[in-house]
Amino acid sequence: MPATLPPLTRAADERVNWVSSIPFFLVHVACLAVIFTGFSLTALILLPVMFLSRSFFVTAAYHRYFSHKSYRLNRFWQFVFAFQAEASAQKGVLWWAANHRHHHRYSDTEADLHSPRKGFWWSHVGWILSNKYNQTDLAAIKDFAQYPELRWLDRHEGMPPWIYGIAALLIGGWSGLVVGFVWSTVLLWHSTFLVNSAAHVFGRRRYETNDTSRNSMLIALVTGGEGWHNNHHHYQASARQGFFWWEVDMTYYVLKVMSWVGIVKDLKQPPTRILFPGTGPEEELIAA
């Protein structure tokens, strides 16, 4: 498939609900409250800590574990990873993973939830603000929906970010809440969204995939390794998305350290025939 494809027209029900999206935009406006709170040293420490820690769990948990099962966790750590990922305020763990599996199944076709072919804004954030994709498709995530604690967490997806927000307030006062929590949340939203939008528009394509996925060092640095998106679409089963040593993948490095102490197990790697197509038969991709 060519790297660029003609635009698609969104379906009639694929539109932003501006009324229900008001809280999303108010969080952005809340960033301006720094005018009144100012910056404190504690808040400036909380900002990168809350961004980087939650960013790791978005990529490691939501994406590489729950969406693609690229490594194993026991049930305790599975819940911990899910809780920490939901602290990003990116909706429920089952909702996130089910929609991501749908994206891979229909990537850059009319059925794709957030292809840039339907508009860059739509792929970046518009689809999330649409009523069409509010519900969790449990049929698409049966393997994890079997766990009642994950179903409960998915239904109460607002609880983890509230806990983080209250913690930021208690640790750093109003400045800690605004700069440490709100700013880091907005930054985390848009860095995550870049993978759906910019990583299908800007960058290079190492592999010929049936979509417009691209590799971008810049996006990889911002997202902990998610910018190696063409690699990922080529072989979704890998826990390592920076296939080669020069492709920085911080999420994988942390997972590797966790494997040394037994938290994560069976980190999947791309075999040689995947890294260098033509050297052997392709394995079936794990997209579910």
Image: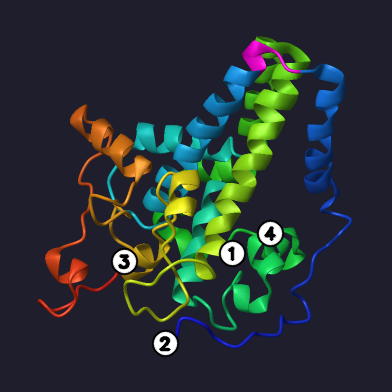
Q: Which residues are magenta?
A: 39-43
Which amino acid, mark 2? Met
Give the label, 1 or 4, closer to the camera: 1
For marks 2 and 1, give the CA distance: 18 Å
Asked which secondary structure carries label 3, the reply is loop
The mark nearer the N terminus, 1 or 3, is 1
Q: Which residue is denoted by mark 3 in the rendering?
A: 286
Tell me what residue is drawn at x 54 percent, y 82 percent: 109
Circle nearer the N terminus (1, 4): 4
- Residue 5 pos. (x, y %): 54, 86
- 208 above or below 31? below
Can you see residue 74? Answer: no
Say if residue 153 shows up in the picture.
yes
| Front disc: 4 or 2 | 2
Q: Quadrant of residue 243?
A: bottom left
* Residue tagged 2: 1
Residue, disc 4: 125
Q: Position of residue 106 (x, y in %)?
A: 49, 77
Disc 1 target residue: 197
Inter-mark Cα distance, 4 to 3:
26 Å
**Closest to the observer: 96 or 16?**
16
Nearer the viewer's eye, disc 1 or disc 3? 1
Residue 272 to residue 208: above or below: above
Q: Return the residue found at the far left.
A: 279
What type is the residue that disc 3 sits on? Ile
Chain-order first, disc 4 or disc 2: 2
- Dot 4: within a 10 Å radius of its alpha carbon, few (fewer than 14), some, or many (20 or more) residues? some
Circle 2 residues within 10 Å: few <14, some 14–19, many ≥20: few
